[in-house]
Image (cartoon, rainbow, N blue to C red):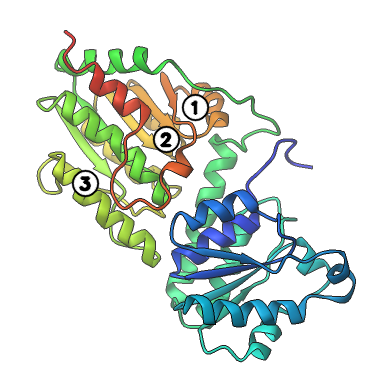
């Protein structure tokens, strides 16, 4: 056993990935309660999630006919552009051939089978299980498939080195007091200290993490700060669209590429972005840095001599960030539900605290 704390599910990772691929309807082939919370959350993001609701009888005799029935219902009821059938522990244990059910259903909607279960230690297996049949179906090309695999390995490595998986159990923590951290941040800006504000966020979470940058810009429009964001136009369809939306939001806040914003990396490159961001920090030589999203992607050697303000959404990320030298760590609780189904930057707690203090001397 490598971990004695709950870890992300590979089934859920598969669901999020098919959403990013432009799937309209995902069918979980398993019990009705499997991945219930995330399935409901993803419906807020426009993905219809159905279930074959397998029960004890199907655990013995199989659920082929039920899956065929649900596939036909999905096509008739929702007229989707793409369908994904996502496996569960039950489907994999009984050896269900989900592709055969797709073939036997006679549906005309492009559909893939994601053969996955929750028995993997790393949730990236669920992502790969969705990407490989997508590549076989021509939804993405082989170059993008290989690119995604490289990025997934990089993200995994960062989590093991400095993230919530850096030891078997990490004590959760709600973070430093936001008003105390915000006061110190504004103090440095008003003293004329040189700063860097970095957005290095994972996919749709950037809709809230970007708010930290816009709030700081609103509070300190004349501060000596270079803004950096991982919003380059690469990745799966939804990822590229999210980057475009967030860039527009930053521009409205006065943070614009070619003016005071530099783009480094894409929204799916958060785990592989550390060295590039580190090189930028070495070049700029700031007195302080705000890192919003996945701060632990940047190795400690790049942060020496810099007062670091980190914003994360993981209570279990607090301890490792502190251990690796981050001076201030704030945690945005329940960020994921607040960034599903949105198409523009949404307020963060830390951002709102910064705004509330902007007029204080």
Q: Residue at x 55, y 27 (%)?
A: 320
Secondary structure beneath disc 2?
helix
Q: Earlier in the sequence, mark 1 or mark 3?
A: 3
Secondary structure beneath disc 3?
helix
Residue situated in front as seen by the camera: 85 or 221: 85
According to the picture, the residue beneath numbered tag 2 turns out to be 295
Query: Distance from label 2 to label 3 (Cα)?
Result: 21 Å
Query: Distance from label 2 to label 1 (Cα)?
Result: 8 Å
Q: Earlier in the sequence, mark 2 or mark 1?
A: 2
Q: Residues within 10 Å of mark 3 (few under 14, many from 20)?
A: many
User: Against 237, is 312 above or below?
Assistant: above
Q: Is residue 334 left or right of residue 343?
A: right
Rendering coords of residue 233 (x, y %): 28, 61
According to the picture, the residue beneath numbered tag 3 turns out to be 249
Secondary structure beneath disc 1?
helix
User: Against 117, is 139 above or below?
Assistant: below
Q: Residue at x 78, y 75 (%)?
A: 63
**Residue 312 picture quarter:** top left
Q: Residues within 10 Å of mark 2 (few under 14, many from 20)?
A: many
According to the picture, the residue beneath numbered tag 1 turns out to be 321
Q: Residue at x 53, y 82 (%)?
A: 76
- Camera-side mark, 1 or 3: 3
């Amino acid at each position: 056993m490598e971990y004695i704390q709950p870890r992300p599910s590979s089934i859920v990772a598969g669901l999020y990935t098919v959403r990013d691929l432009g799937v309209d309807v995902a069918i979980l082939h398993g019990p009705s309660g499997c991945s219930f919370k995330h399935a409901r959350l993803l419906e807020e993001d426009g993905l219809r999630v159905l279930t074959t609701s397998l029960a004890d009888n199907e655990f013995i005799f199989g659920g082929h006919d039920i899956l065929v029935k649900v596939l036909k219902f999905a096509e008739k009821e929702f007229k989707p552009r793409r369908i994904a059938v996502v496996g569960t522990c039950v489907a994999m244990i009984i050896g269900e051939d989900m592709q055969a059910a797709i073939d036997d259903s006679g549906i005309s909607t492009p559909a893939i089978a994601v053969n996955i279960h929750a028995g993997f230690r790393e949730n990236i297996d669920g992502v790969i299980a969705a990407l490989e049949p997508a590549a076989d179906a021509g939804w993405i090309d082989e170059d993008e498939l290989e690119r995604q695999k490289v990025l997934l390995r990089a993200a995994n490595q960062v989590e093991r080195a400095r993230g919530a998986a850096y030891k078997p159990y990490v004590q959760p923590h709600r973070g430093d007091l936001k008003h105390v951290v915000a006061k110190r941040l504004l103090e440095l800006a008003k003293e004329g200290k040189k700063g860097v504000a970095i957005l290095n966020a994972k996919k749709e979470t950037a809709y809230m993490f970007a708010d930290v940058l816009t709030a700081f810009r609103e509070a300190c429009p004349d501060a000596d700060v270079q803004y950096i964001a991982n919003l380059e136009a690469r990745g799966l369809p939804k990822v590229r669209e999210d980057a475009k939306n967030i860039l527009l939001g930053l521009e409205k806040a006065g943070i614009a590429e070619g003016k005071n914003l530099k783009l480094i990396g894409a929204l799916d490159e958060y785990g592989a972005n550390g060295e590039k961001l580190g090189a930028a920090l070495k070049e700029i030589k700031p007195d302080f840095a705000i890192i919003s999203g996945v701060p632990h992607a940047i190795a400690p050697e790049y942060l020496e001599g810099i007062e670091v303000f980190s914003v994360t959404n993981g209570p279990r990320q607090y301890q490792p960030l502190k251990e690796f030298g981050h001076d201030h760590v704030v945690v945005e609780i329940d960020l994921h539900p607040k960034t599903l189904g949105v198409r523009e930057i949404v307020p963060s707690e830390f951002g709102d605290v910064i705004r509330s203090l902007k007029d204080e001397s």
